[in-house]
Image (cartoon, rainbow, N blue to C red):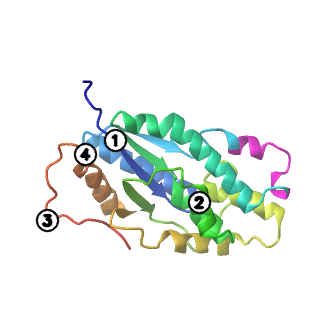
Amino acid sequence: MAEKVPRGHLVAVDGSRGKDVSSAADALAKRLRRLGVECVISRWDASGLFGELAQAGRPGRQVSPRTLSLVYAADLAFRLRWEIRTAIETGGVVIAAPYLETAVAFASACGVPESWLRELLRFAPAPDVRGIVCERKTGQGWKARLDRGYGEYGAALFEEATADFKSKRTRHAMIETLGGDRGRKTFQLSGKGIEQAARAVIDNRPGAPPRSASRPRNARR
C-alpha cells in the first residue's frame, strides 16, 4: 500500500490594504523558513482576471460589488486549483494573501449581505491558521490603484462608477469586520503575532511535540 502523504497547512493572511497584506505574508514566510518550514505564497489575481477586467475600457461604470465578488471567487478557484491544493496535498504550507475574509469584509462594507458572500465562497476550504494584518494608515481611505491590493482595486473601480462610494468610510467598515473574533487560531500579525502564527503552523504539523502550556495561543485583539 502506498504511503499516505501528510496533508499540508493553509494559512490565511487578510487585511484591507494590499501593501500590509503582502508585507505580512512575506514576513510570515520568512519566519517559517528560518524555522525550517518551506512555504509558498498565493496572491490575489493569480488568474489574471482582475487585470483583464481593468483593461476593459472604463470598468467602473459596469461593475457592482457583487460582480467584483464573483470575479474574486473565480480567481480564488484558480488559485485553489493551481497553487493551493497542489501544495497542501503534498504536505506543503501555503500562505494565501489575501484569502476569504478580505473578500467578505470588502463586499460587506459595500452593502453586500455577508451570508451571500459566505455561500459564494463555500467551495474554499477553511484555513488552518488565520492572520489579520496590523493595519497602517487606518484613518485614511485607499489610494485608488489597480495594481495594489483588492481594496485599492475596488476603490479604483467604484470611485469612478458612483459618488456613493466613500473610500475612507468603506475601508473603516472593512477594518471593523476584519477585527472581529474569528476563533482561537486567529493571529494579529504584529511582530509577536507573526512568531505565534509560525509556531502554530509548526505545532500542528505531523510529528510536532505537544504545545507548551505556557505558550500563548493567539494574538487576537
Report helix, strand or loop for mark 4. Answer: loop
Residue 36 seen from this side? yes
Q: Position of residue 75 (x, y in %)?
A: 62, 44
Q: Earlier in the sequence, mark 3 or mark 2?
A: 2
Q: Position of residue 111 (x, y in %)?
A: 69, 72
Please determine whether, in this image, residue 114 is positioned above or below residue 194.
below
Whole-angstrom CA distance, mark 4 to mark 3, is 18 Å
Q: Which residue occupies 60% across, 74% down?
A: 173
Q: Position of residue 40 (x, y in %)?
A: 42, 39
Q: Which residue occupies 85% across, 51% down?
A: 58
Span colored in magenta: 50-61
Eye-nearest disc, 4 or 2 = 2
Q: Which mark is residue 100?
A: none
Name the residue furthest front.
1
Neighbour tally class for label 3: few under 14, some 14-19, many 20 plus, Cα within 10 Å: few
Q: Is there a contact, CB below 8 Å, between mark 1 and mark 3?
A: no
Report helix, strand or loop for mark 3. Answer: loop
Q: Position of residue 156 (x, y in %)?
A: 74, 57
